[in-house]
Amino acid sequence: MDAGTGGRNRLSGRGFRRHVDDGTDGQARHFAGIVAVAARVGTRLARRLSITVGGDKPTSADGRLTDQALEFTRLIRSGELSPADSGDWIRARLCV
């Protein structure tokens, strides 16, 4: 329910790469929220919900960040990315 309403911005910050930065302090929360939803309902449904409920256009910064969060979830679930390497993955793809 929290994700559907946009959640609360307890994780705020800047420093995201331009292609996934919408100019707000909410991108860290957005990424974490999509990962949390995808872990619970699967990546396909999480993507659909991000568009229909969240209003994230696929070509927007939020849409691209959603795609990165879904890829992150897929990699963790499949074992292709270990939790120990997840910080490096995030820094390499999302942070400036």
Image (spheres, grey):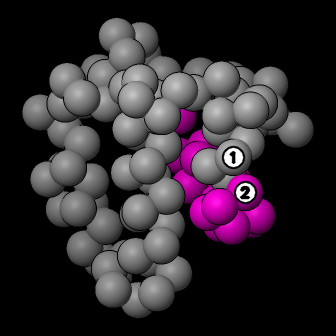
Q: Which residue is mark 2?
A: 45
x 41%, y 89%: residue: 79
Secondary structure under the numbered disc 2 in the rendered image: helix
Residue 41 among magenta residues:
yes
**Where is residue 37 drawn, in percent x and y?**
69, 54
Horizontal side of 81 relative to 48 (left or right) equals left
Secondary structure under the numbered disc 1 in the rendered image: helix
Q: Quadrant of residue 76?
A: bottom left
Q: Which residue is mark 1?
A: 48
x 14%, y 53%: residue: 92
Q: Is residue 20 above or below residue 91?
A: above
Mark 2 neighbour density, 10 Å: few (under 14) some (14–19) many (20 or more): few
**Mark 1 is on which residue type?**
Arg
Residues at circles 1 and 2 in contact by the CB criterion of under 8 Å: yes
- Magenta-highlighted residues: 30-45
x 69%, y 46%: residue: 48
Q: Is residue 90 above or below residue 77?
A: above
